[in-house]
Image (spheres, coloured by chain):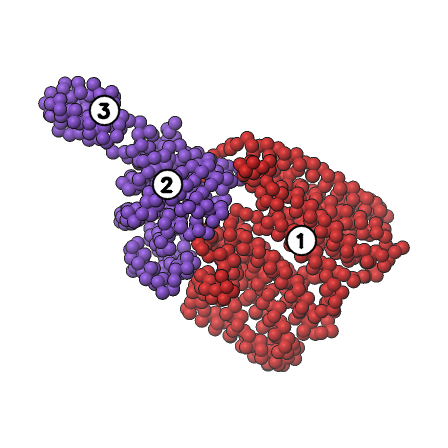
Amino acid sequence: MTFAELIFANPLLIKHVRSRLRRQQLIPFIVVIVLICGCILWGVSVTQTFKDGAAFTCLLFVQGALLLLVGTSEVASAVAGAKHSGTLDFHRISPQSPVATAVGFILGAPIREWVLFLVTLPFALVAAFMGPPGVDGLIITILVLIPSALLFHTLAALGGAASARLRGAGSWVTVLVIILHAGSPLQSGLFTIIPTVTKLMNPKTDLPIRDSFFGLALPVAVLSLLHIIPVLVLLFLAAVRKMKSDFIPVYSKMQSVAFQGVIAGLALGDVVGLRVDDAPGLAGLITIYAMVLAAVLLSWGVTPDAGAFAKGVRRARKLGLPASPVWSDWAANWAPLGLFCGITIVAGLWAGIPDAVARLGGLTLTHLIAPLMVGVATVMCFGSAKQFFALRYRKAGMTYFGLFLFIAWIMPIIIGSLLEISRDTFVGKASHVPQIINALSPAVGIAFAGSPDTMAETTVSLVVATLLALVFVALSVRAEQQAIADAGAGPAKTDVAA
Amino acid sequence: MIQVRNLRVDYDEVCAVHDLSLDIGPGEIYGLIGPNGAGKTSTLRALVGLVEATYGDIVIGGFDLDHDREQAVGLIGFMPDSAPVYDDLTVWEFLDLFAEAYRIPFARRGQAIDQYLRLVDLTEKRHAMTGGLSRGMKQRLMLAKTLLPDPQVLLLDEPASGVDPNGRALLKQILRDLGHAGKTIIISSHILSELSEFCTSVGVMQKGELVVGGTVAEVATRVMGRAKIILEVVGATDGAARVLAADARVSAPAWQGAVCEFAFEGEAEQASELLAALVTAGVRVAAFSREKEDLEALFLKIGAREVS
């Protein structure tokens, strides 16, 4: 299928054009948008605030609301609706490719919002012409806004396809859109239009993000696209997989490792050359946190549940193999987990060593190695614990896993913070106890382990993280052996609703 | 046309289909019978590739579902038990969507859609929104969508559910015509009494396994036991009683006046031999009826889990 066929002969895209662009529905929406945009221009003209960029900002808000909020929600509900009604199955068994299905939903479901976006463009052109950011600024904004919208639409398609329930499917994507646009914390803001527009409106603004990639100074818009496009491609691959089948994980194990590699590339690109006098080792710490967070999310996706694991064992036995091949979707998560750890180590060292070397005497390699070890142990602990709970406790496993995370990762922060604010009553002003308790959680422990003045906290964090990792690796190995033995015992129950 | 070997389907910790093997030839209409949870839907969904089998080989029209998935699935038309439609499309647009998905040439598309709309008696509803159709109409629309790419194999999961009596008659006629046209059909249904007339063979599923399969008569004999024959004679009954007593295939004759009901082990041909023997012995036969294999009764028996 050619690119042109993918777009112009895409049955699902045509379906959405028909259903979402019916004249009787579209015209009222166009009238509303024209009136809103007209009012914005009129209001700005009356208050003479064109030069402040007020009109452009307001129109951008309307465009963002259309594409990022309404459009995202439309994609999620269209995909979830097709999945839960069963119409998605019809596409799966038709000659239509999963790529065409994914494109059909991602471009088609928000087609009305794209048309309304086009309606706002002449108004945005007037606003851009009359004040900042100028016509070239408008073009740059659109060049970032479109991939950014596609990124969230793709994420919504993935959310809809993976949703267990129809109601509220993909609403987390909308929440993510709001959080990223409202807060834009650090580099994650680059997935939005906010840094680009802020810089265009006022080039002298100091953004809370670095405007260089691997040390090369780049315009913020380019930096945004550098972050958006690879992640968009990886999310699209995941969406295509879910369009193909409901019964496979979002990523294959290989793809998840590739995703971790891309995150490592982005994280390194962002931190290379970062040196903050007051925060030694910051580059390494940021990278470690980014890698651990990505590894945790990805290992969630590639860990098979007990049913899938048993299925893999049975299939392997039928083929004369002792167990599923390590890269199979149905195999335990050891292979990707090992590579996540490897990529985390490489990225952490790459980011941290130059800073540590430059500060010899003030910061030693130990302060890079320690948080790295905590980070790797955390990844190993999370992945093996998830695998253990899934295999050992089956459906109840997720509840127990959640309980474990709450106790091991959240409770220390709560107790440590409570002790910190009631220091006078319980532990005394100079005591390290609140920090030590905080350090029990890897969420804080990684940072403590990287600090030069926190020997006790570093030790506690390192010991606890390593111990938990070792315990869960051992438990997971045993649970895996037991699951293999159980799978060989043959079917237990055979009654399912047809 | 359809070969299945050692198919197993698992959902989480539940085995839905266990080591199922099937051989269905071209032009056969195969009824899949079984109580709820027997694994009928899972079998059909595995055949069309919507459920990934744990293991097993599925070959459709010579194409292996694992290795030549596109060709194998290209031969199949699948109609699920629910009737999922895009509520925001008209009937015509819905069919056009799938005509496009199945790459029916644009020049032939309109004609094909009109033809199948006529077939399922929905021509008048061509501009109606699918969301406004009754369940029976949606089911018919689903059948039109299934037939649109002219598949060689039809997998129909409860096609008559929610369809009114007229719709059922229409469905029966369409299926009969498709059978005559050489299509291979697997149909799972609870309304078996209406379908038994044209199912050439049946398979009985229970707890994920195919417990019995074959022609309707074979399966009925195996599941229901011996066929029942009702004999009515004119005049004395002792001559008839002697003939019946002499035939080893006859058991448990029960006389009520001139009418005798007995179990008979044998097919239609053997029954005709018995009738000939009665007439030769001078018995004046007023009525001789062999109770037809009733899939509905068969189904009820399976539903009651009486199949050994």
Task: Report which quarter residue B259 is drawn in.
Answer: top left
Q: Is residue B299 left or right of residue A425?
A: left
Residue B69 at x, y = what percent?
47, 49
Amino acid type, label 2: Ile
Residue positioned 54% across, 55% down in the render: A240
- Report helix, strand or loop for mark 1: helix
Which residue, given by chain and number where applicable, does mark 1 sit on?
A: A260
Residue B283 at x, y = what percent?
12, 23
Residue positioned 75% across, 42% down in the render: A466
Residue A434 in sight in this render? no
Which residue, given by chain and number where applicable, does mark 3 sit on?
A: B262
Q: Which chain is red?
A: A
Q: Is residue B284 left or right of residue B292?
A: left
Amino acid type, label 1: Gln
Q: Is residue A18 left or right of residue A325?
A: left
Residue positioned 55% across, 30% down in the render: A489
Residue A117 at x, y = what percent?
53, 70
- Report helix, strand or loop for mark 3: strand
- Looking at the picture, does residue A303 appear above or below residue A38? above
Which residue, given by chain and number where applicable, does mark 2 sit on?
A: B24
Q: Which chain is purple?
A: B
- Report helix, strand or loop for mark 2: strand
B123 or A393: nearer the eye? Answer: B123
Amino acid type, label 3: Phe
- Neighbor class of circle 1 (other Cα within 10 Å; few <14, some 14-19, many 20+) is many
Subunit of mark 2?
B
Residue positioned 57% across, 69% down in the render: A63
- Looking at the picture, does residue B218 appear above or below residue A173? above
Structural distance between the alpha carbons of marks 2 and 1 = 48 Å
Subunit of mark 3?
B
